[in-house]
Image (cartoon, grey):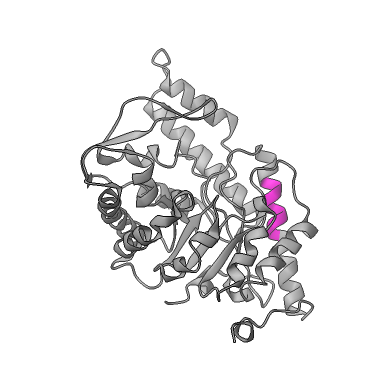
Amino acid sequence: MTDTREQFRPADHPNDHFLLTTVVGSYPKPEWHDTARELFEDPDSDFDVEDWEESKDDAARLITEEHERAGIDVVTDGEMRRNEMVEYFAHRIDGYEFNGRVKVWGHNYFDKPSVVEEVEYDQQWLVEEFEFTDDVAGAPVKVPITGPYTLASWSFNEVYDDEEQLTYALADLVNQEIEALVEAGARYIQIDEPALATTPDDHAIVGEALERIVDDVPDDVRLGLHVCYGDYSRIYPEILDYPVEEYDLELANGDFEQVEVFKEHEFTKDFAMGVVDVHDAEVESVAEIKENIKRGLEVVPPEQLTVSPDCGVKLLPREVAYQKMANMVEAAREVEEELDAGEIDLVDHAAAED
């Protein structure tokens, strides 16, 4: 697999070593943007489609710039146009319909869609979002897209023989969307499969779906897989066979206990390790994050390490989310300086395998 990392190194990067910094996807929405959504959905309001489009554009522009101000190497728009990771896509896929909200846990509800006809690709999902963000950003842009296994698992299936067949049908649609994104200029695409960690016995299904997704995707496009919340020992090292270059994994929330899982077999792909906890509103210090990053260097050499938060940070207060990102970037740059100076003893991963 072609190494796609170097294209994301900033031209003015200050260090010889380069730890790629990025975000997983979602970011806290400005309060005025939430208010705008409420007005748009209120039938008694005169807040129209044009007003709502302006609000989405303004929010996307603002958060993209906020990521850049924090120093992130590869940014997103914080998913300002999206309301939920399955519902957003189901509204854009022919064959889905919505029948009302279902309780997920506690007092939380989810507008769980149903597949009532064979799914079809009728309209582009994310191309306009990417083109807008790419236009306003000075940094490269990553596109997170919900994967077919999660789209299938978190939906009611009334058409296909089983969830596996629905997953493969959706994978073909995701492939079409990624081809459209690549045509528009996207070079970093992250496939989100949180359902994999909750049903790890289906890792072979996810692997087959990914094979369908990556068909005909050019080698210079960086493809990553994001998995969170689960026992990674049940899917590792099997997931290393997936046709992606990078694995984005949540580790900070579990105090990095699962880092040991990835030392049992050589991590042959890029390791995007969560180094700040998105469930804790306390901002980690730069020193603390540096130690977290060094835990990743126990698994892979620097040229395979990507630094990111555990997951989307949308549930944090916005000022907390920003400071976590800024501290994360500063920590990565300081670790790079220490690597350049030879102040960090690196693990000889090849010797460790022997």
Would you place residue 200 above or below residue 87 in this image? below
User: At 53% across and 52% down in the image, what residue appears?
Assistant: 228
Residues shaded magenta: 322-329
**Front in this rendered view, residue 165 or 17:** 165
User: At 29% across and 52% down in the image, what residue appears?
Assistant: 164
User: At 65% across and 67% down in the image, what residue appears?
Assistant: 296
Q: Quadrant of residue 107?
A: top right
Q: Does residue 339 appear in this view?
A: yes
Q: Is 291 covered by the magenta stretch?
A: no
Q: Position of residue 180 (x, y in %)?
A: 30, 57
Q: Is 325 covered by the magenta stretch?
A: yes
Q: Position of residue 45 (x, y in %)?
A: 43, 15
Would you place residue 79 above or below residue 44 in this image? below
Q: Quadrant of residue 354?
A: bottom right
Is 175 displayed left or right of 258 in the figure?
left
**Front in this rendered view, residue 191 or 48:** 191
Q: Position of residue 77 (x, y in %)?
A: 51, 47
Is 149 displayed left or right of 302 in the figure?
left
Q: Position of residue 281 (x, y in %)?
A: 71, 40
